[in-house]
Amino acid sequence: MKNINWSQLGFHYTETDYIVRSEFHNGIWSEPIATTDKTIQLNLSATCLQYGQQAFEGLKAFRGVDGKIRIFRMEQNALRLQSSARGLYMQPVPTDLFCRSILLALQKNLDFLPPYQTGAVLYFRPLLIGTTPRLGVGPGKDFLFAVIPSPIGPYFKVGFHGTPFIVNRRVDRAAPLGTGQFKVGGNYAASFRATEEAHAAGLSCIFLDCKEHKYIDECGAANFFGIKGNSYITPASSSILPSITNNSLMTLARDMGMKVERRKIPLEELAEMSECGACGTAAVISPIARVIDPDNQRIYEFGKEPGPVSIKLYNALQDIQYGRVPDPYNWCKIID
């Protein structure tokens, strides 16, 4: 095991020994290979650079309480990358190839898998890019798929504590019939004008729907959920990335006897919620301490500490990921 101060890791890139890559040429995917070369040779006219033909994923491997390794919902990440690929007219990566690449990246970088109870995990960033040189507008026919591993710590420095958010009506993250439902770099680049402004003020950003600027869409790079009575409520929108973490939390909420609602959420409904949060692979759950709506000079307060439902959901999900309880949903790929 590498000599790394695991408890001090944040959500940033730490180079590992190997990455894994596969290429698509002439209608065929090559077998994935592990390599120490972290660079690629790419024509400057490649479609990923000229026209943004690119998509990515994020998933984690956990060292469990029993010493076994668990990769969380790997097949769902494969399916979501396939959806993103089809949305940008790229060649989808077959599920088997995706999973074998993740397992190979894990095997070749086992020394970078953090120990149990350090708060750190091994994160995988699968990346799919178009590599065909092209100046005329159109999709490429050649693609590179790569898996970039990195040990990471918590996404938010404050850990599992409340984070303040601010509403931004001046920037739209993605259009309803655009690429919002796909995990592509352009969506994130389009949000930087809002998120970086918020970060400079010590805040995170909430985006509203781009048609009416009335309904909650996403929390920066994460899905939103709110607790209202015995209901777990999350937005329904064609411009929201379908979060695997949010899907898992909805399942857990139902099993806890809660009602799950996927619908439009007017911003003003925050006043009726007891707690709310952002959720995704990186943060798992980031409780929202307050939401500032500067345009209406209103602040919705939820407190610095996570609410009881958020705590229960967070612990239930983490218990499965770390093997502290049985996994009744078969979400984890277990490696002895």
Image: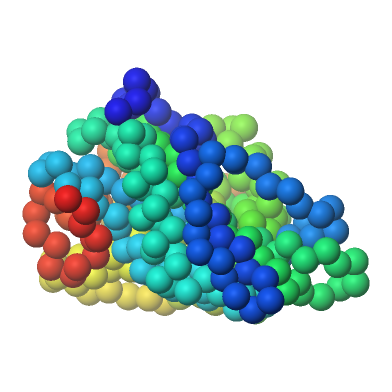
Q: How is the image coloured?
A: rainbow
Q: Horizontally, is 319 left or right of 46 in the view?
A: left
Q: Residue at x 9, y 59 (%)?
A: 326
All told, the count of numbered labels is 0
**Nearest the eye: 243 or 194:** 243
Image quadrant holding the N terminus, namely top left
Q: Residue at x 30, y 58 (%)?
A: 72
Q: Is residue 284 visible?
A: yes
Q: Where is 150 relative to 233, above or below?
A: above
Residue 119 quadrant: top left
Q: Is residue 219 visible?
A: no
Residue 39 pos. (x, y %): 65, 42
Q: Horizontally, is 177 left or right of 74 in the view?
A: right
Q: Horizontally, is 278 left or right of 72 in the view?
A: right
Q: Residue at x 48, y 74 (%)?
A: 94
Residue 292 pos. (x, y %): 51, 46
Q: Residue at x 70, y 69 (%)?
A: 142
**Nearest the eye: 41 or 190:** 41
